[in-house]
Structures are given as C-alpha cells and as structure tokens.
Amino acid sequence: MTKKKIVLASKSPRRKELLKQIGLNFTVDISEIDERRFSHSSPLNLVKNLAKAKARIISKKHKDAIIIAADTLVVLNKEIIGKPKSKRDAMQMLKKLNGKTHLVITGFTILDSKKEITEIVKTKVKFKKMTKKEIDDYVKTGEPLDKAGGYGIQGKGAIFIEGIKGDFFNVVGLPIYALSKALERSGVDVSSYWL
C-alpha cells in the first residue's frame, strides 16, 4: 500500500497528539464551518454531519489526500454538554456530570477522491461524586475550558473518572482503533508509517 498524504481537518491538540501517537505523518488544515446550522440535529446526526462537512470542505483544497475530520460531544440524558465559555460555565457542567454516567460520542469521516467513510463511536464515562472543593480546584487549573464536557480524561480530570465502558481514546477526542480500521479500508496501511 502506498503512503498517501493525510490531512487532519481539526485544530484539536488532542487529535493531533493521537495521530502522532499512532505514527502517522500528516498536515493540519482547519475547517471553519458554522456549526449552528447543524444544531437542531440529534447528537448522533450532529457528530456525523459535522465530521462530513469538515472533511468535504478541506477535501476541496487537497484533491489527492486522505482527509480525517471528527467531532466529539458529551451527552447527559439527551442534553449536549459543549465546551464551557467561562469558569462559571465549567463549574455548572461539572456539577451536572457529578456522580453520573454520561456518553461521549465521536463522529469521524475519512474522505479521499474514491470513497467516504463515516462512523460513530460511543463511550460511557462514569464520574465519581466530586466535592465542591474538588470542582472549584479543578476549574482553577484552567484545564476544563477548551474541552467538551468541561474535563480532560487525559489530564488532571482523570481523578474524577470512576470508570469507562468503551474506547478510552474516544473520550480524548478520536477513537483510534475504529479510525485505524477505517483508514485500512481507505487504503492506508498505518503500520507502514512507522518504517
């Protein structure tokens, strides 16, 4: 299999780290789309449609490349918990998630000139019962402010995670196993990038 140019259509530092972790060489081209026009969709349709839209926009600029785009949501009882806009917002989110199990849903699209693959991966995350002090102290670190749901499982927020059911990397922002299998179906031999 040939090594095709790979373009990540995301500004997420976590997604960049995960692709580097599995040894892919890639460039980043951020797709700017108005996510509000998708906001009336169900969570599953929302992540799927946003991933497709991001990939299609970037594919117009990179004709002979494989485009990877993704969108991740945190969902509690059908309510989408987005990224906090402020420290106060982060505190409210963490209070909602406190002691409960929520769903992290990622939709990703792999797009090249021949085919488009879109998949959705779901992971259940159970939060421990946090004290008010723990929430306050965590928000003061600044870590929650750029993350869906207001926490980072790969950072300090890990101490609040009682358990997960599903793909850990999905909670970080990209379901690596499902993505690597989909890349193989797109003609990308991931392990060839290690050589």
Image (tube, rainbow, N blue to C red):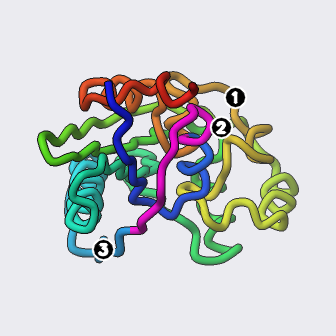
Residue at left offset 67%, top offset 42%: 153
Residue at left offset 37%, top offset 50%: 70
| C-alpha span from label 1 to label 3 | 35 Å
Residue 7 part of the magenta segment: no
- Give the image location of residue 173, x and y in percent: 51, 45
Pointer 2: what residue? 127
Residue 26 part of the magenta segment: yes
Which span is picked out in magenta? 19-30
Marks 2 and 3, the one that precedes in the sequence:
3
What label sits on residue 162 in the rendered view? 1
Pointer 3: what residue? 33
In the rendered image, the quadrant that contains the C terminus is: top right
Q: Which amino acid is tagged 3?
A: Ile
- Give the image location of residue 161, x and y in percent: 69, 34
Marks 1 and 2, the one that precedes in the sequence:
2
| C-alpha span from label 1 to label 2 | 5 Å
Labels 1, 3: front one: 3
